[in-house]
Image: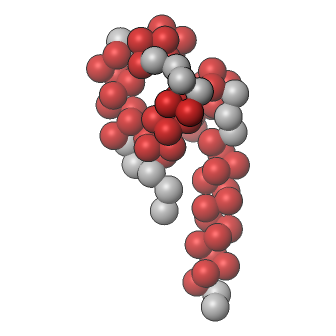
Amino acid sequence: MIHIGNKIKEELHRQERTVTWFASKLYCNRQNVYDIFKRENIDTALLRRISTILGHDFFKDISTDMNHTNATNNI
């Protein structure tokens, strides 16, 4: 199962964005961003906001992981 907080952190770093930048886009403080990075799951409304801010479809990542897991389990 995908750890969504890690995926968000990886994407933020891939884009060479700072935690401070991300926190300002989310209208929260840096500690909240670090808390998001620790989450294995996340509210869909928040994930939608994050996907929009980072221009990355995290829902697709989850779906791909789910399809891969289902295919592996059917073997």
Residue 37 occupies quadrant: top left
Is 1 or 12 nearer to us in this picture?
Answer: 12
Is 15 or 36 nearer to us in this picture?
Answer: 15
Q: Is residue 73 visible?
A: yes
Residue drawn 44% across the image and 44% down it: 6
Residue drawn 38% across the image and 24% down it: 33
Colour scheme shown: secondary structure
Judge left or right: residue 30 versus residue 1.
left
Residue 67 in the image: state x and y as whole percent: 67, 68
Residue 15 in the image: state x and y as whole percent: 59, 27
Q: Residue furthest bottom?
A: 75
Residue 45 in the image: state x and y as whole percent: 58, 31
Viewport quadrant of the C terminus: bottom right
Judge left or right: residue 39 versus residue 22.
left
Residue 40 in the image: state x and y as whole percent: 40, 48
Residue 35 occupies quadrant: top left
The answer to whether residue 4 is above or below residue 45 is below
Q: Is residue 43 visible?
A: no
Residue drawn 59% across the image and 72% down it: 69
Residue drawn 62% across the image and 64% down it: 66
Count the numbered circles shown: 0
